Image (spheres, helix red, strand yellow):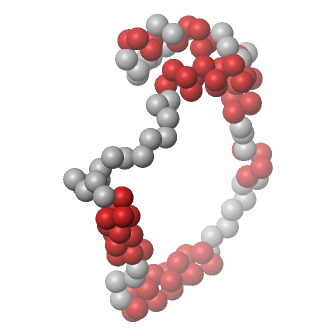
Amino acid sequence: MLINCLFPLTHCSNTDALLHKQGVAFWKSWKSKFESGNRPASHVNGITDAATVAETFAMHFAKSCASNTSVGAVRLRNEYTRLRRDYYCTIDIDRYKFDAELVEVIISN
């Protein structure tokens, strides 16, 4: 099996070991090798004060998520409603669902 390794060489030497693990053992090993944990950022745009960072995010998303004008908001809503009215989906979505277990079974075969 050819493995295209995108991780540093020290991690690539462990790739063969991952190929032979199944289920929970695979994911436990994967996380220990490749995930660095959930560490909060120490600064954002040079700002280190948590309250100021939070306020900066709040202002940014308030501007990004608000309509520029009430006329523009109505226009976008009308366009969405028009497009949605003609939308028809014939695909059986449940037929295409998969999870990690299915992927694991397919890979191991």
Apparent side of residue 30 relative to residue 21 in the rendered image (left or right) = left
Question: Does residue 14 sit above or below 29 in this rendering?
Answer: above
Apparent side of residue 88 relative to residue 32 in the rendered image (left or right) = right
Query: At which x and y percent is residue 72?
Result: 38, 86
Query: At which x and y percent is residue 16?
Result: 56, 7
Apparent side of residue 2 relative to residue 108 in the rendered image (left or right) = left
Name the outermost residue toward the bottom: 71
Task: Let me know if residue 79 appears in the view.
Answer: yes
Question: Does residue 73 sit above or below 18 in this rendering?
Answer: below
Query: At which x and y percent is residue 27?
Result: 64, 25
Q: Residue 18 occupies which quadrant of the picture?
A: top right
Q: Which of 62 and 73 is in front in this view?
A: 62
Question: Does residue 92 sit above or below 15 in this rendering?
Answer: below
Q: Which of 83 and 52 is in front in this view?
A: 52
Q: Residue at x 77, y 49 (%)?
A: 94
Q: Which residue is drawn at 60% across and 19% down?
A: 29
Q: Nearer the viewer, residue 94 or 44?
A: 44
Q: Residue 103 occupies which quadrant of the picture?
A: top right
Marks counted in the figure total 0
Q: Residue 65 occupies which quadrant of the picture?
A: bottom left
In the rendered image, which quarter contains the C terminus?
top right
Query: At which x and y percent is residue 23?
Result: 73, 23
Name the outermost residue toward the left: 46
Q: Which residue is drawn at 51% across and 10% down?
A: 14
In the rendered image, which quarter contains the N terminus?
top right
Question: Does residue 94 sit above or below 67 in this rendering?
Answer: above
Task: Let me know if residue 107 appears in the view.
Answer: no
